[in-house]
Amino acid sequence: MFVDFFLELRSAAIPVSLREYLTLMEAMDKGLAEYSIDEFYYLSRSCLVKDETNLDKFDRVFGHVFKGLETPEDEDGTTEIPAEWLCKMAEKILTDAEKAEIEAMGGWDKLMETLAERLAEQKKRHQGGSKWIGTAGTSPFGAFGYNPEGVRIGQNESRNQRAVKVWDKREFKNLDDSVEIGTRNIKVALRRLRKFARQGATTELDIDGTINATAKKGYLDLHMVPERHNSVKVLLFLDVGGSMDDHVQVVEELFSAARGEFKHLEHFYYHNCLYDHVWRDNGTHSRDRIDTWDLLHTFGSDYKAIFVGDASMSPYEIKIAGGAVDHWNEEAGGLWMQRLLNVYPKAVWLNPVKQHWWGDTVSIDIIRHLLNDRMYPMTLEGLDQAMRELT
């Protein structure tokens, strides 16, 4: 069963190595999962999954391979093995000689009593043999399909509905890298763009420094360091209004996640394309405009620029002066985009429009060309690729 589990994980394109599988087997041999199928789920997931985007695939494989398995209710692992089920299995598996041996032991009642005694004596998994409860052996107990890890096998459904079956909940299903992103998994992808540095007041214990100083002086010598923060600086440009009204929720989720991940984050709004001004507050944008020239001279070139927009507009809004729909732009939007990219060469564009529709809109192709094809869809995979581009 464990080998099948390993092979099915590989078939599902989860990069599981043989070394990781052997680590899981070693952990099982040391009894880390004990008698709990749920503990085995968490143990195997921690050993075999290296990337959060594979968690949903892992849950699907786990649910398929271990379908019908449940954790026993009692800690001693002796939870109800129905006599009628044992009898049914005996008819299929036991020879006449083995049936006679059971009768010689004192019948089914004696069989169950002996089973409980051996469960109490047995401390680990057993493969083969004629006494202990295990698999592929001649023990009458192992032949009945009872797993020594303390789970039931072979049922079409649960009798008591006790199993938690956390893998069926698939709590990480939104992390599949082909789905539309949400706040919690946006944060996972944004962590690709992290560069930690210690800045500010010394408020955090320096463990290594304290150990070294204490060892040298012979008495406790506490050393403190500034707290580590993500030192990456980001300029976030958000398209608002018009066709972007259909994407408000996902953009809000991205904005919320970005504010939580980056200490140095400056955000600005624009409409359709970048022009001679941007703004921070949509309620007062008509009077509280920020000159784009001022922005370019305020924030250093160490900032990374992220544009969020559907890039869906008239090509004139990018190509010519006076093409903007909401004001008179004396210079083409494409020229302002190029000026910004000259100052911030590390820049990407995130597009909430499904990628297979991009070819239907001329303006999307123009924006993609301006950014040297650094436009990415707003899926988890697309966001991950964008963050890699910025690093």
Image: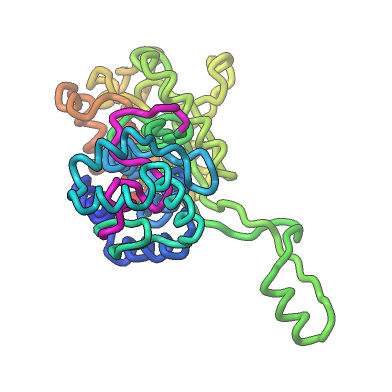
Residue 375 visible to an observer of this rendering: no
| In magenta segment, residue 7 | no
* Residue 65 image offset from top left, x and y in percent: 27, 42
Say which residue appears at 56% left-offset and 51% top-offset.
Answer: 230
Q: Nearer the viewer, residue 287 or 174?
A: 174
Q: How many numbered discs sit on the rendered protein?
A: 0
Is 187 on the left or on the right of 100, as rendered? Answer: right
Say which residue appears at 48% left-offset and 47% top-offset.
Answer: 77
Specify the quadrant of the image occupied by residue 92: top left
Quadrant of the frame with the C terminus: bottom left
| In magenta segment, residue 141 | yes
Q: Is residue 299 above or below residue 379?
A: below
Q: Nearer the viewer, residue 59 or 94?
A: 94
Q: Is residue 117 above or below residue 265?
A: below
* Residue 355 image offset from top left, x and y in percent: 22, 29
Say which residue appears at 30% left-offset and 63% top-offset.
Answer: 130
Is 36 on the left or on the right of 132, as rendered? Answer: right
Q: Is residue 387 above or below residue 122?
A: above
Residue 355 visible to an observer of this rendering: yes
Say which residue appears at 47% left-offset and 31% top-offset.
Answer: 162
* Residue 15 image offset from top left, x and y in percent: 27, 55
Q: Nearer the viewer, residue 367 or 40?
A: 40
> Which residue is situated farthest in the right direction here?
219
| Colour scheme shown | rainbow
* Residue 3 image offset from top left, x and y in percent: 24, 56
First to last magenta residue range: 137-162
Q: Is residue 369 above or below residue 251?
A: below
Give the main secondary structure of the magenta stretch: loop
Q: Nearer the viewer, residue 205 or 151?
A: 151
